[in-house]
Amino acid sequence: MSTQGKIAIGGVAVGLLLLYWLPFWAVLLIVFGVPAVAYLTLDPSQRKRLRRVSRKELGR
């Protein structure tokens, strides 16, 4: 199994644990808040490179 597959399975497991332990709104806050904060911590050149790579993977 690839490393990305293992990370995805781990993420799903953590998400299910959070749903069990926390209220739904808190889980949504974590699921959407953590990636948003991580994106905002990047400097502008890193954000630009990330957008460019994401578009290439989509085949644009």
Image (cartoon, rainbow, N blue to C red):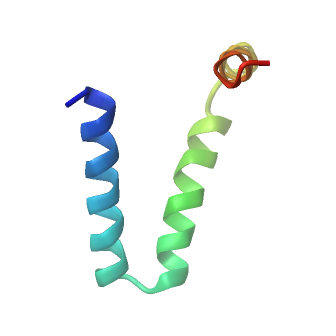
Indicate whether 17 appears above or below 32. Answer: below
Q: Is residue 15 left or right of residue 60?
A: left
Give percent across and percent down for residue 50: 66, 21
Q: Residue furthest left?
A: 1
Q: Residue at x 73, y 16 (%)?
A: 52
Residue that extends furthest to the front in the rendered view of this protein: 59
In x, y percent, where is residue 27? 47, 73
Which quadrant, please, contains the N terminus? top left
Q: Quadrant of residue 58?
A: top right
Task: Please state the horizontal and vertical placement of residue 18, each as a whole percent of the image.
Answer: 34, 72
- The residue under the point 63% across, 27% down is 42
The one of 18 and 3 positioned closer to us in this rendering: 3
Residue 22, horizontal then vertical, whole percent: 37, 82
Left or right of residue 24: residue 13: left
Vertical order, 22 against 13 (above or below) = below
Compared with 11, 21 (above or below) is: below
Number of on-image labels: 0
Q: Residue at x 63, y 47 (%)?
A: 36
| Quadrant in the rendering for residue 46 | top right
Determine whether, in the image, residue 33 is placed left or right of residue 22: right
State the residue lying farthest toward the bottom.
23
Q: On the rendered image, what quadrant is the C terminus found in?
A: top right
